[in-house]
């Protein structure tokens, strides 16, 4: 058995079509299925597939608070080694994303975070979405100074080590 992946998706409930497309792209991933938690931030969730754990919060905890709650829920459901955090308007256009994530974390034991490339519908990535010093292109992998919250994978032990996401930054 390889690394166990869990997925946390936060939603404000205002993008049900995009959320459905995202969940379809998660279901299409190759390999062992990931455990998926969708968190409604102070909203009722639309009908979701049976394989999704739905959590409806009475209030919006903010992005960091929602991600922390998602990580806790994944622990309650049996734990995972790596958490994939996705925004509800995201999409995994390839079916091998989770396999590549697992391989990266298995290969690099000290790896804490893998940031996903954010691209628009045409495949273009804006420079502001490349959190790397200098002017290296979006298609080049490398060390970064920050990572985008709406599409990343983070080792659960890294979450534990830093004490979670800083909820005070709502």
Image (cartoon, helix red, strand yellow):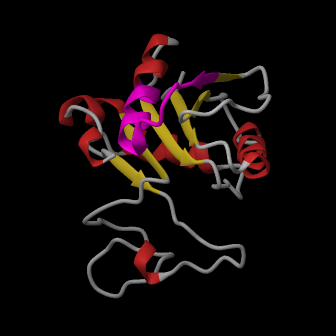
What's the residue at 67%, 28% (across, down)? 33
The x and y percentages for residue 75 are 43, 17
Image quarter where the N terminus lies is: top right
Residue 37 screen position, x and y as percent: 58, 28
> Residue 39 or 135: which is nearer the viewer?
39
What residue is shown at x 72% (from left), y 40% (from top)? 23
Viewer-proximal residue, 102 or 50?
Answer: 50
Numbered marks: total: 0
Q: Is residue 41 left or right of residue 128?
A: right
Question: Is residue 39 one of those drawn in magenta?
Answer: no
Q: Is residue 40 or residue 155 the one in the foreground?
A: 40
Q: Is residue 45 left or right of residue 42?
A: right
Q: Provide residue 29's location: percent of width, then percent of height.
A: 71, 41
Does residue 65 belong to the magenta stretch? yes
Please state which of residues 161 and 98 is positioned toward the viewer in this rendering: 161
In the rendered structure, which segment of residues is drawn in magenta? 54-71
Looking at the image, which residue is at 28% across and 85% down?
A: 134
């Amino acid at each position: 058995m390889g690394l166990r992946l869990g997925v946390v998706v936060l939603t404000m409930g205002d993008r049900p079509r995009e959320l459905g497309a995202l969940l379809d792209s998660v279901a299409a991933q190759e390999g062992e299925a990931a455990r998926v938690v969708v968190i409604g931030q102070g909203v009722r969730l639309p009908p979701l597939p049976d394989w999704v754990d739905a959590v409806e919060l009475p209030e919006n905890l903010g992005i960091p608070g929602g991600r922390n709650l998602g990580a806790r829920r994944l622990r309650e459901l049996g734990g995972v080694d790596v958490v994939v955090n996705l925004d509800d308007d995201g999409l995994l256009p390839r079916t091998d994303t989770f396999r590549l994530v697992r391989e990266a974390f298995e290969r690099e034991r000290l790896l804490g975070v893998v940031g996903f490339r954010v691209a628009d519908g045409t495949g273009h990535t804006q420079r502001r979405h490349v959190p790397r010093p200098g002017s290296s292109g979006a298609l080049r992998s490398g060390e970064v100074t920050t990572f985008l919250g709406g599409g990343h994978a983070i080792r659960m032990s890294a979450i534990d080590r830093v004490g979670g996401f800083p909820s005070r930054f709502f």
